[in-house]
Image (spheres, grey):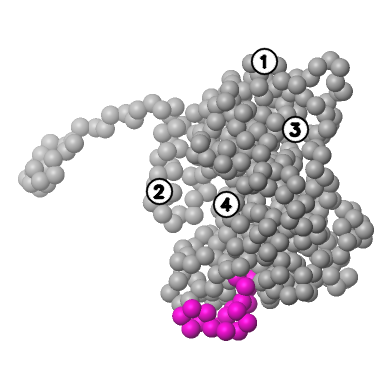
Amino acid sequence: MTQMTVRPGDPLSGHRRDDLPARPEQPPRPTTGRLLDAGARDLDDHLARHGSVPWQGAPGRLLDELRAAGLTGRGGAGFPVWRKLAAAIPSSGRPRAGGQPSRAPIVIANAAEGEPESAKDAWLLATAPHLVLDGLALVVEAVAATDAHVYAKPGSGARSVTRALAERRAAKIDRRPPDLRLAPRSFIAGEASAVAAVIDGGQAAPFHQLVPLSAPASRGEGRTGRLRHPVVVCNAETLAHLALVARRGATWFRSTGTSDEPGTMLVTVSGAVRSPGVIEAPIGMTIGEIARLAGGATEPLGAARVGGYGGAWLPADRAHRVPMTRTGLATWDASPGPGLLHLLPAQACGLAETARITSYLAGQSAGQCGPCVHGLPELATATGRGGRPRPAPPPPPPPTKENRVLRVLFPPN
């Protein structure tokens, strides 16, 4: 891997010493050789590189390995994968709590990427679709699912996975062959319950739940029809990691990353960097190290935004030392989210950037709650004014016989 040096006072820069090789066209890759090196031209190439699907033989058998590996979801929430799957495993036809019969789960590979800056899942589907589909097949086996789906936005990733699904059907790879459902290009389209709603034939909008989506729901618990079945929504990157854990084991997975947050993560780096795009980093790398994997900063920086449009800003002079982990970012009331890092130039206005993001989010509301319907547009307007106070309201009308009593009972502020 190309080594980058850091000039004093420019902690996120990518300037090199004269004796180092010229910057490559693509971001240098870490030496872990995981997802970025897992791509294959077609099914035959994938089988030659990775072998066949490592079937476990029965539902539930993969859970202990996933628990030992410490694999967490890479879609943003960071929930332990084994725990999500455990909630969905049927109880061999025996009634569940409340006398409700077991229902076969539905499994969905989620590559919708509602975050506008995210590109990792589309990249995975475009370059390593069979690894994602292997992970999906293993989850189907683990929870004894009867339905499987891939959910992705239109583009190169969807086209690639369409070809991969056809190859797998011809080769009879999958025991429950999945289908592809296209996601709308909206911010909320990738939220788990919105994903489930689309699979059930509805609109891509979140719905209220009284029990976790991956657990079965009884009547009156916010889900109807097929959605009362356990619905296991797994991010595409999560499934790719899962497929490798099933092949190589928990010890291999834990050989990089931190003890609390093992493995690697895909990070989409954007903003003022020389080589914006998707990079893979061992979990525990600092923001500065990740920025250098993307070629380093192109100019002095003012801030780093982590976690996407719903994330948080960190000052550039301190961000370079902060690990891109849940633990490291907790001090800043932030998280890695779905692996997003954006570097803002020092000359850019942070308030203007916040206004841009807030305005976008205001237009993406599901229209289901007051803070989104009213609060986001108000916040967008306020930030768009640059923090200037509102004009003074007009004076109240003179009292009349009709409003005099009201003005006494409810005096104006």
Please tell me which of labels 3 and 1 falls first in the chain.
1
Rendered image: mark on residue 371: 2
Q: Distance between the residues labelled 1 and 4?
A: 36 Å
Badge 3: few (under 14), some or many (20 or more) residues near its Cα, within 10 Å?
many
Badge 2: few (under 14), some or many (20 or more) residues near its Cα, within 10 Å?
few
Q: Residue at x 87, y 53 (%)?
A: 40
Q: Residue at x 73, y 56 (%)?
A: 250
Please tell me which of labels 1 and 2 falls first in the chain.
1
Mark 3 vs mark 1, foreground winner is 1
Q: Which amino acid does label 4 sit on?
A: Ala
Mark 1 vs mark 2, foreground winner is 1
Mark 3 vs mark 2, foreground winner is 3
Residue at the disc numbered 3: 293
Q: Which residue is drawn at 87% across and 58% down?
A: 50
Q: Position of residue 134 (x, y in %)?
A: 78, 63
Q: How far apart are marks 4 and 2 (CA)?
A: 21 Å
Residue at the disc numbered 1: 8
Mark 4 vs mark 2, foreground winner is 4
Q: What residue type is labelled 1?
A: Pro
Mark 1 vs mark 4, foreground winner is 1
**Does residue 130 sit above or below 104 in this rendering?**
above
Q: Please state the extent of the stretch shown in magenta in the rendering.
A: 88-106
Q: How far apart are marks 3 and 1 (CA)?
A: 18 Å
Mark 2 element type: helix
Q: Residue at x 43, y 42 (%)?
A: 377
Mark 4 element type: loop
